[in-house]
């Protein structure tokens, strides 16, 4: 069952929604519905993804051949810069 909700928007927000709806070939109500769904998902923690989660499959996937790369990162960079400067 669908229900209806009336919301008052600022002129700027109304204009932005209209522009986006036109660009995406959607109805304004679709844009508002999508925004509300996303807000609720994020607020309830459904889509909360930590940056680590996005790249965890890449960590350790490539070997540089340098055993203490994390500990001596600055020194390794300085050597590289001097080598190619």
Image: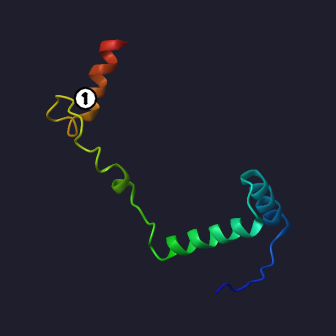
Q: Position of residue 26 (x, y in %)?
A: 73, 60
Residue 68 rendering spot, x and y as whole percentages: 16, 35
Does residue 61 appear to the left or right of 38 in the view shown? left
**Place of residue 30 in the rendered image (x, y in percent of width and height, measured from the top left):** 70, 67
Compared with residue 57, is residue 2 higher up or lower down, i.e. above or below? below
Q: Residue at x 25, y 27 (%)?
A: 76
Q: Which quadrant of the figure has residue 8? A: bottom right
Residue 82 against residue 65 in the figure, above or below: above
Quick one: 84 or 50, which is closer to the camera? 50
Please say if 57 is above or below 5: above
Q: Is residue 1 left or right of residue 43?
A: right
Place of residue 11 in the rendered image (x, y in percent of width and height, measured from the top left) = 85, 67
Residue at the disc numbered 1:
75
Check the image and report above or below for 5 versus 26: below
Secondary structure of the residue carrying tag 1 is helix
Query: Residue at left 34%, top 13%?
Result: 84
Q: Answer with the quarter of the image where residue 79 lies.
A: top left
Name the foreground residue: 60 vs 29. Answer: 29
């Amino acid at each position: 069952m669908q229900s209806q909700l009336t919301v008052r928007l600022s002129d700027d927000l109304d204009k932005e929604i209209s522009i986006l709806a036109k660009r995406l070939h959607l109805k304004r109500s679709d844009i508002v519905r999508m925004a509300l769904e996303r807000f609720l998902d994020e607020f309830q923690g459904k889509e909360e993804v930590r940056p680590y989660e996005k790249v965890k499959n890449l960590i350790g996937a490539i070997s540089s051949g340098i055993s203490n790369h994390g500990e001596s990162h600055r020194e390794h960079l300085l050597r590289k810069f001097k080598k190619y400067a």
